[in-house]
Image (spheres, grey):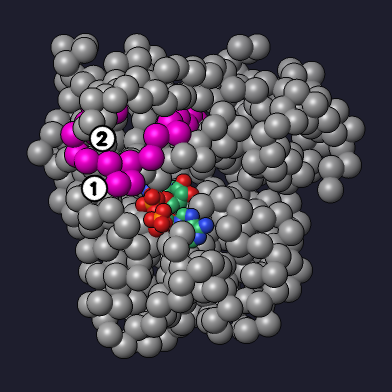
Amino acid sequence: MLTNEYLKRVYDGLAQRNANEPEFLQAVREVLESIQPVVEKHPEYEKAGLIERLVEPERIITFRVPWVDDQGKVQVNRGYRVQFNSAIGPYKGGLRFHPSVNQGILKFLGFEQTFKNSLTTLPMGGGKGGSDFDPHGKSDMEVMRFCQSFMTELYRHIGQFVDCPAGDIGVGGREVGYMFGQYKRLTNSFQGGMLTGKGLTFGGSLARTEATGYGLCYFTAEALKCMRNDSLEGKTVVISGSGNVAIYAVQKVSQLGGKVLACSDTHGWVEDPDGIDYTVLEHVYNKKRSGHDKGVTLAMYVDEKPNAVWHEGDGRGVWQLPCDIALPCARENTLLLEDAQALVANGCKVVGEGANMPTTIEATTYFQENGVAFMPGKAANAGGVLVSGLEMSQNAEHLSWTFEEVDGKLEQLMRGMFHNVDDTAKEYGQEGNFVMGANIAGFLKVADAMLAQGVC
Ligand code: NDP
């Protein structure tokens, strides 16, 4: 609950001005609630109007994206870039192509990204962008024409010292490649660090594709080790989603000795008594994105794994299974209070958010009140942007590190991040509250930088 008068005043004003942006307000409220003890200790924040500035994006760019489909018909989508906070480095955060994209969702994601990037310890500010374009079922040529048109407007607002986007839902290596090509053409410059998630032949980093899912598992494994002297060995895990984050979380869980029982997509969920096979998920994922095979769903998994069972309908069925660990890796607000109640009743002890804000506030509170170790996405899924930061370092050095080097740094930094979050929670008398630990630790660095830079 918000009890601090200053924070309440800031939040109420924000809620009035942004009443139609519930996800943004949800994300801000969670952070403001967490940082109350810090703000109370530091009256200089109020004096500097720091929180009012922190919750207002530095800049929002909105633009038209016209493109021509394969039938020769003109289509128009809306493009965005939210440049949220550049106190600790150039704006950095993914681009999302999905029909649900709107300004409120991107403001929530850009706000979260600011703290996530701060937690990585790398010098990156927070941003997010995208479009309501849906790449599902589009041909390669349609995706290319869309990406080129999108970049034709975006290019003037980004650059390696200004704003460095990456992928997110609906934006993988293919889309990044098309956008990078168009940026290069428009600016006549090869700026590797301007866009991350690039192909390996033009400055991409090994292990970037796997980074978010792997990082989630390293973070979770460190939590198990530190809190319970335990590991992922022999643990049962359920996962939502079956996209980039989910696939490599499945792979790493099994490498670390655990077993993934089920995963999902927007059409339903699949359970496999032999443990979900990430190679089959990769196959389905690539088929979905190829555009040649419209109507592909995760149901295809059982074609290759006849022991598995497909449940058509709501993917939330995964939360009904007894398990030790749940890793929501789909989208915001897809794990609700009833799901949390079912998970706790069935013995789940650890939840790690692979997606951004997949757990509603009510479900998060329920987990925390029932002894579940809850790892917020802001920290637990930071592996993707972390390796994006490492991609920028390699580009700046004109070097390519090996898979093992990148993966090793990822593991070390994710395990270190867990300790930063854990120690911060303890310092503020909130042992085991990783939401507070992550929010406070992420906030402190940004707040210090903002104070040092004066009113701007
Ligand atoms: P993808 O587009 O690759 O995958 C998303 C997956 O979630 C798809 O399988 C999709 O199914 C499924 N999905 C979406 N909504 C639902 C739902 N309501 N129920 C069940 N399944 C659903 O995205 P990513 O894996 O890249 O991203 C997932 C989340 O992780 C997002 O919140 C993103 O912001 C976050 N994230 C991603 C990072 C990255 O490096 N990729 C980094 C940090 C965070 P379908 O195919 O049917 O649409």
| Circle 2/circle 1 CB separation < 8 Å | yes
Question: Total label count?
Answer: 2
Q: What residue is disc 1 on?
A: 291
Of label 2 and label 1, which has the lower sequence position?
A: 2
Name the image quarter holding residue 154.
Answer: top left
Nearer to me, 158 or 379:
158
Q: Is residue 349 left or right of residue 213?
A: right
Residue at x 21% of width, y 12% of height: 186
Q: Residue 192's x, y, as percent?
A: 21, 27
Name which residue lies at 25% across and 77% down. 303
The reply to whether residue 220 is in sight is: no
Amino acid carrying label 1: it is: Gly
**Which residues are drawn in magenta?**
122-146
Crowding near pointer 2: few (<14 within 10 Å), some, many (20+)? many
The numbered disc on residue 174 is: none
Image-based side of 246 in relation to 332, left or right: left
**Amino acid at dot 2:** Val
Q: Secondary structure at mark 2?
A: helix
x, y percentage for residue 223? 52, 67
Q: Is mark 2 within 8 Å of ligand 1?
A: no
| 126 in the magenta segment | yes
Residue nearest the observer in this picture, 224 or 127 = 127
Name the residue carrying label 2.
Answer: 143
In percent of width and height, residue 28 lies at 69, 38
Towards the viewer: 303 or 226: 303
Q: Residue at x 29, y 70 (%)?
A: 300
- The structure residue drawn at horizontal position 17% and vertical position 45%, both measured from the top left corner, is 401
